[in-house]
Image: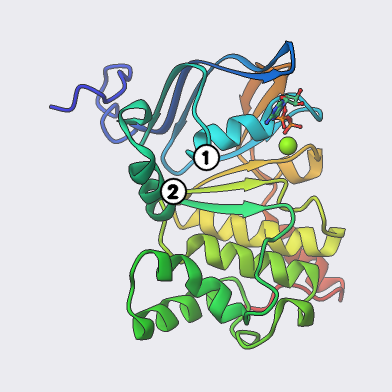
Amino acid sequence: MNTSVVDVPAGPTARSRRPVIALRNVVKEYRMGDNDVHALRGVSLDIPRGDFVAIMGASGSGKSTLMNIIGCLDVPTRGHFWLDGVDVRTLDDDDLARIRNRKIGFVFQSFNLLPRMSALANVELPLVYAGVRPHERKVRAARALEAVGLGQRMDHYPSEMSGGQQQRAAVARAIVTNPALILADEPTGNLDTESSLEVMAVFDVLHSQGRTVVLITHEEDIAAYTERVVKLRDGHIVDDYTQDPASARAIHQAHADAGRGGVPR
Ligand code: ADP
Ligand code: MG
């Protein structure tokens, strides 16, 4: 019996719906000179496995702070956070690094691809850190690139790819370890509409494969692809609702039908 497992409401589905992410009264404060910055002021949130969630809010509302905690890149000042049932406070730095590598795939606004490496080599990197052997690394990285529609561009360097292609390569890098959770901070923030659509189509497919996807955005039309919206203001959750997602694939198809190109599959 693992006593660190978060209490979930009793019921027949309680076990299978154990949240991948559970936060209770999470507070994050930063010290800035003589001032305390209250980035999160008591956030409680459950995200069940398979959810597709947008975290929204104005600049400075605490979105990135929340993502950094969920992604085990930072720890709460106070409160509790369980990742996949594990109380993160019980873990040391090595454990946290291992969890980040094995359970979480990160996607950032600025792609963060290494410029002197091909798409394939970039996508292989998390597997290098995980100690996977070279041949298996190549096979798995190639598969991840094919899954995001970049099967023809594996040997390309970041400078030879469009923004949308670079971000799809970054998504391939995020999924290559087969993580329980995909976390994306403003993944379309540097992309034009067409490229944003390509990237959202990829997230949509990942979600339909049963993966848990949490993305941060301040764009309503990006949040519209998800099935749940959590809104932050001044470090508080001020809204949390489910919605019928606009299917990125349907919108993409409409674009393709209109002759505007799209996501290669
Ligand atoms: P968002 O991603 O919604 O723009 P952030 O989570 O980045 O918001 O920031 C929330 C608040 O915390 C802001 O007031 C920001 O200035 C502050 N903050 C974030 N990170 C730090 C830090 N490392 N040191 C000091 N203050 C920070
Ligand atoms: Mg931010």
Q: Do the residues labelled 1 and 2 touch (CB within 8 Å)?
A: yes
Position of the C terminus by quadrant? bottom right
Mark 2 lies on residue: 100
- Residue drawn where x is 78% and y is 78% of the image: 159
- Residue drawn where x is 74% and y is 24% of the image: 61
User: Front-most of 78 and 146?
Assistant: 78
How far, Cα to Cα, is label 1 from label 2?
A: 8 Å
Q: In which quarter of the image is residue 92?
A: top left
Q: How crowded is mark 2: few (under 14 residues within 10 Å), some or many (20 or more)?
A: some
Indicate the amino acid at tag 1.
Leu
So how many labels did they put on this image? 2
Position of the N terminus by quadrant? top left
Locate residue 68 relative to residue 64 in the image: left or right: left
Locate residue 6 relative to residue 200 in the image: left or right: left
Q: Where is residue 234 in the image (x, y as percent from the top left)?
A: 74, 16
Indicate the amino acid at tag 2.
Arg
- Residue drawn where x is 56% and y is 60% of the image: 205
Element carrying mark 1: loop
Q: How crowded is mark 1: few (under 14 residues within 10 Å), some or many (20 or more)?
A: few
Mark 1 lies on residue: 73
Vertical arrangement, residue 95 with respect to residue 128, above or below: above
